[in-house]
Amino acid sequence: MSDKTVQCISPVDGSVYAERPLASAKEIGKACRSARAAQADWKALSVSERGAHCSRAVDAMLAMADGIIPELAWQMGRPVAYGQGELNGFEERARHMIAIAGEALADIVPTPKQGFTRHIVREPLGIVFTIAPWNYPYLTAVNSIIPALMAGNAVFLKHARQTLLVGERFEKAFKAAGLPEGLFHNLFLSHSQTSELISGGHVDMVCFTGSVPGGAAMEEAAAGQFMGLGLELGGKDPAYVRADASLGNAVENLVDGAFFNSGQSCCGVERIYVHEDLFDGFVEGFVDLTRQYVLGDPLDDATTLGPMVNAKSADFVRGQIDSAVKSGATAHIDESSFEKNKAGTPYMAPQVVTGVDHQMSIMREESFGPVVGIMAVSGDEEAIPLMNDSPFGLTASIWSEDEKAAAVIGSQINTGTVYMNRCDYLDPALAWTGIGHSGRGCTLSSVGYEHLTRPKSFHFRVDTGA
């Protein structure tokens, strides 16, 4: 990347897949002015009228699937076999947030009080600035874009340089849907331009998904602006397999939860605690299933594990594994059996590590790659403190046939979402949120709309005795 352009370097072969010029100061200023003007008219439309535009945009995006799926593979390494899943999730979230908008944004009317008319309305904030990541580029972006528009806001989108073309796809979809001109802007920005847009008070809400240092940079840029700030950051999500769990179900789902998208998921499973009675069988089944992955070219339909986003990220995970093994851990996967695996490249074999403890980076620091550490525990009393022994708190999963026990355990876990017998899934009807280094704020569900609007109270005395 030069000081005037931004590039997407494909993990498939290291080539420059896309390059775009950074927005000029003049273009940014024009975007701000046109967004303010368009938003003033947009907020006057009914929720159903906004929904009609947004629904057409969803339709337009889905119509581009044949182009989007291979683009994803080239940009961030997702195998084409899973490309449609990204769009299915995009649609599910978008449709849900459109459907619930009327109720979620409705006026709040308190108990009647004689002589007074009272209610609370939810007003749009103005311009919502979505800063989206590359790992789930449509799923994460839609979490705020569609709800922000439905709530009456204008939207700026800055997508990660690794997925430059995603922002253009959103732009095309909204144009095809007839969205009012100026209401949505896809901007190619540098880090400094992003910071200036926030620190200058040009936007009213920031929805950022990315790293913990990136979240800290957002808070620094927003200091003194008194704007809303939603941060979805890192994760080191735990799973606990109780003695009463269905072993086959736990193995199958946790392997997928650990290695889907090459482990590059904020809510991917990175550490597993298994009751000692099930431990040996669980590890055996987990390793056997992991060996069935096919590491290769993401454009090949047979590939089930694509490259990581870049060689640096892959080598970080390799370093975690090497460090754990030197400290006494056992790596169960023969990486040489994965022909494409090679140090210094983004192509990395999945790995399962046992004999780990919480002194090791592999159980403490976010890996964001295809590796998982597994520990044996004696029961709930040992598992719960280990699950909470992390600065992160995005999701946690409990594997058990006892719903009451899972509820009791879940109430003691410091996390944004508790699953039972599933993992690595986002239900748009539920609040998506985290604690600690996993961030703050909320997207999706009716609660998500509260972060994209501000309350305004009307308190009229209608009986003055005149």
Image: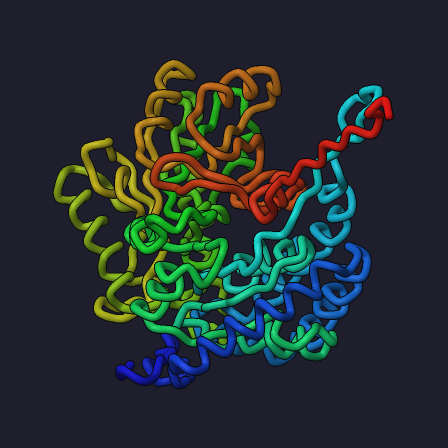
Give the percent coordinates (x, y) of residue 320: 22, 49
Residue 231 in the figure: left or right of residue 184: left
In the picture as drawn, the residue positioned furthest to the front comes out as 466
Residue plotted at (64% across, 70% down): 38
Residue plotted at (38% across, 79% down): 25
Q: How many marks?
A: 0
Viewer-side residue, 239 vs 417: 417
Give the percent coordinates (x, y) of residue 121: 70, 41
Residue 23 in the figure: left or right of residue 461: left
Q: Is residue 141 above or below residue 458?
A: below
Give the percent coordinates (x, y) of residue 196: 34, 65
Viewer-side residue, 319 vs 39: 39
Q: Is residue 347 above or below residue 215?
A: below
Give the percent coordinates (x, y) of residue 466: 86, 26
Residue plotted at (62% across, 39% down): 447
Q: Is residue 132 visible?
A: no
Viewer-side residue, 102 vs 196: 196
Residue plotted at (47% across, 47% down): 228
Residue 125 in the figure: left or right of residue 164: right
Viewer-side residue, 225 vs 54: 225
In the picture as drawn, the residue positioned furthest to the left comes out as 326
Q: Is residue 411 above or below residue 159?
A: above
